[in-house]
Amino acid sequence: MVQWSLNGLLAILAQIKFIVSLATFVLIIYTRSIHFMYFVVGACLTAILGKVLKRIFQQSRPQGSGYGMPSTHSQVIMFFATYFHCVAYTSMPSLVCCVSLLALAVVWSRVQLKHHTLSQVTVGTLLGILCALLWYAAWSTILSPLIVEYSPFPRFFIFVS
């Protein structure tokens, strides 16, 4: 019974990219926020960086074909979780905690499913966190102040903060 539950959980976590992509698409339509669009561009650039680094490192996966260093799943999900933490920690700490736990579960599942080694998910995780922190810093110190100063409707452009 425990093994079946673990396999079921791993199967769900393996499909998380589709769930996150759908949720992101819905939020783009719903919010129409320039900050959210900026966030999505950052997530896409992070994924592209991961794909480029895979071609540079050419480190194989534990099982299967293709390269595994860094884990792009780990990188992108940690970008999402870290950026969300930066934006929403003070207003929604419980939700931020849940998102962080989900992200860590996805990272863990990549090793359990033998799609990546521990070092591949560690590098992906650290890159995702670093990219999110840099992307958020660029938003909060450069872009957001410019929008507030020059936009006739500044509140329309601000995401959650």
Image: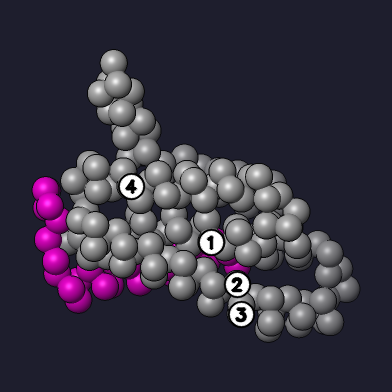
The three-letter amino acid code for the residue at tag 4 is Trp
The three-letter amino acid code for the residue at tag 3 is Ala
The residue that disc 1 covers is 82
Q: Residue at x 36, y 31 (%)?
A: 9
Disc sitting over residue 138 in the figure: 3
Q: Give the alpha-carbon distance from disc 3 to disc 1, as whole Å.
A: 14 Å
Magenta span contains residue 42: yes
The colour style of the image is: one colour
**Residue lying farthest right?**
152
* Upstream in sequence: badge 3 or badge 1: 1
Q: Residue at x 57, y 63 (%)?
A: 83
The residue that disc 2 covers is 136
The three-letter amino acid code for the residue at tag 2 is Tyr
Per the image, label 4 sits on a secondary structure element best described as helix
Magenta span contains residue 67: no
* Upstream in sequence: badge 4 or badge 3: 4
Q: Give the alpha-carbon distance from disc 2 to disc 3, as whole Å.
A: 5 Å
Label 1: how many Cα within 10 Å (few below 14, some 14–19, many 20+): many
The three-letter amino acid code for the residue at tag 1 is Thr
Region in magenta:
38-66
Left or right position of 140 against 82: right
Disc sitting over residue 108 in the figure: 4
Asked whether disc 1 touches disc 2, contact meaning CB atoms under 8 Å apart, the reply is yes
Q: Give the alpha-carbon distance from disc 4 to disc 1, as whole Å.
A: 17 Å
* Percent x, y of residue 103: 45, 49
Q: Quadrant of residue 151?
A: bottom right
Asked whether disc 4 touches disc 1, contact meaning CB atoms under 8 Å apart, the reply is no
Q: Give the alpha-carbon distance from disc 2 to disc 4, as whole Å.
A: 25 Å
Asked whether disc 2 touches disc 4, contact meaning CB atoms under 8 Å apart, the reply is no
Q: Quadrant of residue 66?
A: bottom left
- Which of discs 4 and 3 lies nearer the camera? The answer is 4
